[in-house]
Amino acid sequence: MVEPEPVGYPATARGCPFDPSPVYREAARAGPVSPVTRWDGSQAWLVTGLAEIRTVLQDNESFSSDPGRPGFPFVSADLREFLTSGAMSFLFMDDPGHARLRGMVAGDFTARRVKAMRPRIERIVAEALDEMVAQGAPADLIASFALVVPSRVICELLGVPYGDRAFFQRQTDIMCSNLSGPEQSGAAMMALSHYMAGIIGQGMHESDDSLLGRLAARVTRGELTTVEATAMSMLLMLAGYETTAGAIGLGVLALLQHPRQLALLKADPALAKGAVEELLRYVGVSQVGSLRVAVADTLVGGTLLAAGQGVICMLPVADRDEELFPDADRLDITRPPGQNLAFSYGVHHCLGAELARAELQIALPALLRRLPALRLAVPADQIRYKYEGDLYGLHELPVAW
């Protein structure tokens, strides 16, 4: 049997902007586990099969999320510096440390808590639409709506001044872009870290029932260090708006480019829940996948992944699995629900998944109800995608109505 040639990772070639890179799709056709050559010339494994990805992500004994372990498959030198700094807190930790820190904030993101937040999210969406309409068309849907809604929601939840959004959005853009050099990325990370540490410090001296205020109280009681609380706040801020903003922008664009699906959702807003799941599956916000390193020799999909080898679970490719999602390359908001991997899987399943779903389920129907004639204000081939980012999205989305 001829061994497959390693593909390059990360792949830059694109076909349809909503599809995973054809490089990864081709690798998936050869088998659920493929060798890859990373940006620094080292070797790792690309896992594209749905069942195989679930196997890796739920096996926390054989696969580690710790970027400090030898063989961890960093996407770039910048990301290596970022992740090994600890800035992403429990997202890149193993248990028991992961469970300890995540457990301190998990209660703020339960389905029950998110349900209670829905009326406030509805008001935030309505206010954002009021402001966008008042400014007039054409408008940039990303700056005027897709970023506004999740930024306001997470700022209120965390206790971060929304008036500072230009600062933290700028730092996040630099940190998440592969075009930023190490000095730029490091400076942005330090700036955001100092900003969050300042909020935590202020909360240690003032009574504050926000999420960050409660983290500050834990620092005061000796349950958390200031460094741990700061890293957690950075993670929650970044993850709390960047991915949701990307999903809103890409989701709206996908609907505008699929008029029949757009018409279905306009005619029946009750389809919103299923439409959101289908859009999350279809647009694939995660570009780099879920990263792990094998800590024990493990057989996955008939391939031996040896201890010390990097493993890259390419979630958007698995979400095009034809067995679970027939005719998977077609957008169908009436598709029966399947268990997509948009929010990953296992113990590292996205903490804010329910909040992101609620924001999307509220924002998309409200947008189409308020602006039924919504349309692109530029030709589709002029839209700029964030191909250079670790998280996928749009730089801007000019629209009229």
Image: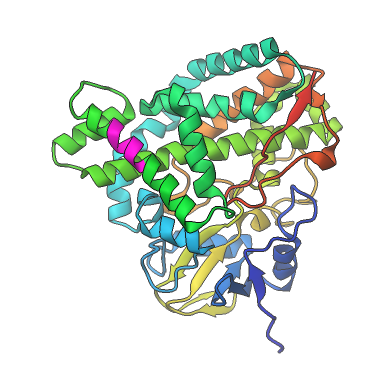
Above-or-below relation of 108 to 227: above
Q: Residue furthest front?
A: 183
Residue at the outermost left position:
221
Q: What stretch is highlighted in magenta?
A: 193-199
Q: Is residue 197 magenta?
A: yes
Residue 325 locus on image (x, y percent):
72, 50
Dividing the picture into quarters, in which one does residue 113 lie?
top left
* Count of numbered tags: 0
Q: Is residue 375 magenta?
A: no
The residue sitting at 77% across, 33% down in the picture is: 255
Find residue 192 and report its horizontal and vertical position in percent.
39, 40
| Quadrant of res 370 | top right
Image location of residue 103, percent across then percent down: 31, 42
- Tell me the residue at 42%/60% (across/down): 81
Tell me which residue sits at (58%, 13%) in the image: 127
Instruction: Write the residue at 66% across / 77% down.
Output: 6
Q: Is residue 378 above or below residue 232?
A: above
Q: Which of 242 and 58 is in front in this view?
A: 242
Q: Can residue 114 be seen in this view?
A: no
Q: Position of residue 110 (x, y in %)?
A: 41, 33
From the viewer's perspective, is 299 left or right of 398? left
In the image shown, does 277 or 229 lie closer to the viewer? 229
Residue 283 placement, left or right of 228: right
Q: Considering the image in quadrants, where does the C terminus appear? A: top right
Q: Can residue 267 be seen in this view?
A: yes
Front-most of residues 183 and 42:
183
